Structure formats: C-alpha cells, structure tokens
Amino acid sequence: MPEGPSILILKEKVQQFIGEKVIAATCNNDTLDTEILTDQTITAFKSWGKHFLICFPQFTIRIHMMMFGTYRINSHTEKPPRLHLQFEDGELNFYACLLQLIEEPLDKVYDWSADVMNPEWDTKKAIKKMKALPNLLACDALMDQQLFSGVGNIIKNEVLFRSRIHPESLIAAMPSKKVKEMINETIRYSFEFLQQKKKGTLKRHWQAYHKKECPRNHVPFIRKDTGKSRRASFYCELCQVKY
C-alpha cells in the first residue's frame, strides 16, 4: 500500500494537468458516474496521507490505492483502468483503487493537522488525541490515520526501531519525552522516505522493515503481527523498550 510520501510523489508528477479539461472519462465499475467529469477542469491536486485528491470546481475525486493500486501517466496497460481521465495532450489511469466522490469542501472533510507531511501538522493535537485513548499501543497509534495520516507499515517499523520503542508499548505508559521523540522521528523519517523513494534507494536504507537481524545488537529480529491491525512488526527485544 503506498504510504504518504509515495502519494506526494504522485502529486508532483501530475502537476502538468492542473488547468486541463477532461475530454473523456471512464470507470470500470459502478462506483463513479464519469459523465460528471466530462468538460470539467482540474483546479488542483491535493493529498491527505494516503488519499490522493483530484479537485474540480464543484467536487473532488478521492483515490485510495489500497494494497495493490497503481497508476500510469500518459500511458496505460492492457487491463482496463478503474479510472481513466483523457485530456487533449495526455491521460491519467488508475488501477485497483477505491474511488469516492466528495461534494463537501475539503476543509470540512479532512483534518490537515493530522497529515504528518502537511505544513499544518500539529504535534500537540496528536498528543491530545493519543491521551484520550489510554489502551493505545504504539504500533496502533502510528497506523491510525486519524492520528498519523500517511504512515504505513514501513514508516511504523522504521520509526519504532529508530526511537527504540517496542511496538506493543502502551502510549499512556511512555514518558512524555519518548512520545515526542516518536512523533519527531515519524515526521523526520517520512521526509527521508520521500527523498529515498525519489532516488530509488528506499529499501537500501531500511534498518528494521523485513530485516532479519538488529543492526545494533546483531541478534535476530522478532517478527510478529501486532496491534489491532495485525500488521507485521519487526523489532529487537534488546534495544526496543516495552513500556
């Protein structure tokens, strides 16, 4: 599943279509009436975590890539796209994704301060939200899109390892300095992820995700499905403290 940094890369790649008019559109299921898109002009591309947003004057199309979503810019595959947008000088195609029509103003739909890569990110607000959930585990906190929009399993694992926090730590039991350290590392690593992804070196820099040995203590990593999401965690029992 593409994480927040990958959606930002997509947003950068499609800037050429801002101000362009859709001359034809198709959808390979019944989730979206594409007739409303014809002759509509794209006003902006935005993102909220893992959500990619195509903005038109009166509505927005939300695209969520889920686990296996892909896209093509000015090209296409033999497989029919979930959403096809044709322009006079190009095309956009999205595959294996979820589509949703948003007719409300985006500021009413999204809390931009919860997006870890948005300039409006608010650390104090994130801490307040976590304090309201006394049984929250660190692994679940980072994967909760209302708390850390854009964080996926890669960022979760790398942040917890770098912060030396066991994934099953209770947020309520963690020292306040440690909670802030986890948040700061989440922001920092998300932007590292972005730059490494652009350079094609992301996997080369992983320290924990899908690794077999702790690079600090040279002991085997534990691999365990943790938290409510039951997503895989890779951690070291020697250097990652369980609070």
Image: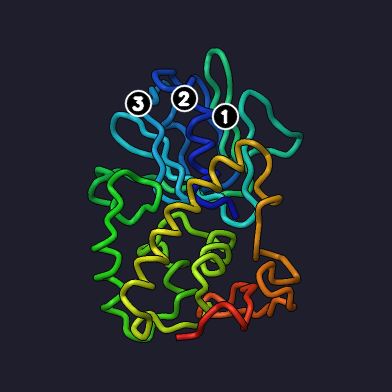
The quadrant in which residue 215 appears is: bottom right
Q: Which mark is residue 62?
A: none
Which residue: 31% across, 75% down? 176
Quarter occupied by the N terminus: bottom right
Under tag 2, what secondary structure?
helix
Residue beneath label 3, please? 43
Between marks 3 and 2, how big is the CA–CA gap?
Answer: 10 Å
The amino acid marked with disc number 3 is Thr
Q: Is residue 46 above or below residue 161?
A: above
- Which residue is outermost to the front? 217
**How many numbered marks, from 0 up?**
3
The amino acid marked with disc number 1 is Leu
Q: Earlier in the sequence, mark 1 or mark 3?
A: 3
Q: Earlier in the sequence, mark 3 or mark 2?
A: 2
Q: Which mark is residue 92?
A: 1
Which residue: 36% across, 63% down? 146
Q: Position of residue 228 (x, y in %)?
A: 50, 80
The reply to whether dot 1 and dot 3 touch (C-beta < 8 Å) is no
Position of residue 187 in the picture relative to residue 230 (left or right)? left
Kindly tell me whether residue 110 is visible in this rendering.
no
